[in-house]
Amino acid sequence: MSDFYWTIDTVLGPSFIAYNERGVSAIMRSESAAEFERAFQSHFHRPVQPTPEPPVDLATAVSAFFDGELSVDEARKQLPFDLRGTTDFDRAVLLKTAEIPYGEVRSYSWIAREIGHPLAVRAVGSAVGRNPIPLLIPCHRVVRRDGRIGEYGLGGTDAKRALLSAEGVAPDWLESLARAGIRYVGNPETRVYCFPTCRQAKQIPDGERVGFGSDDEAMTLGYRPCAVCRPSGILDREATA
């Protein structure tokens, strides 16, 4: 089973995307095709070769993903991943990361809770850092527990901010909430609290959002977790970021 690659244009500039019959296997930024081929061979211990024309369905799905035109369910069907060589834990982390919607963010502790390892926040961070398919497995949408942007392996914090901005997320706004100690926002009408970027939170009228620094604070005041973005809840209290 051979891997092939082509070049795609991204917010961060040209990047190389590799695939095989199992699915997309890697995305990397390199100075040249030769450098990418060497990096791929070193990491995956198998060769990769250029293709004059990627599969139409795959190329179309990749383009639609970057434009925010695929739902999570559609992306799961149209963009398979080849994650051979990753551990079961890393695979669980990466597949959960792939569920974060376009234009939204979640925390490392959220991923840890969702995969059933609420105390493994640092291990989650390490697994995200090893992501072989950034952009399509959108680790740029994972932020620190306090809401700060955090680091990013495909170009640092500036690259992460650029990717989030392209999806309509305002990094400065997220950072301002973090500085104010606000992790969640609540709707006083529905008594539901969410991650600030959740599509439900975006429907709260301006000036009516209630900020919370923790799940305890929100629930003590009679708010319940959003069923859409599933803020961390009870298990998250035990996790450390």
Image (cartoon, rainbow, N blue to C red):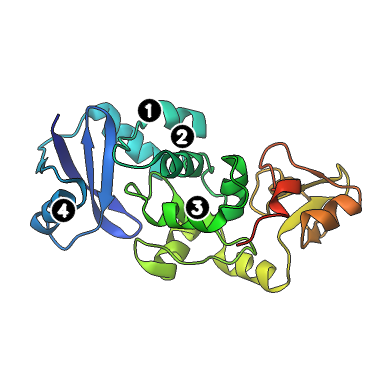
Q: CA distance from mark 3 to mark 4?
A: 24 Å
Residue highlighted by disc 3: 124
Q: Where does residue 30 sit, x and y in percent of width and height?
A: 19, 60
Residue at 18 percent of width and 50 percent of height: 40
Amino acid residing under circle 1: Gln
Q: Position of residue 3 (x, y in %)?
A: 16, 37
User: Of callouts 2 and 3, which one flags the residue occurring earlier in the amino acid sequence?
Assistant: 2
Dots 2, 3 in contact, CB < 8 A: no
- In the image, 21 versus 237, the foreground residue is 237
**Residues at marks 1 and 2 touching, judged by CB atoms closer than 8 Å:** yes
CA gap between label 2 and label 4 equals 32 Å
The disc placed on residue 135 is none
Closest to the camera, between mark 1 and mark 2, is 1
Counting residues from the start of the chain, the first of labels 1 and 2 encountered is 2
Identify residue for label 2: 70
For marks 4 and 1, the one nearer the N-term is 4
Inter-mark Cα distance, 1 to 3: 26 Å
When asked about the image quadrant of residue 5, the answer is top left
Q: Which residue is mark 4?
A: 42
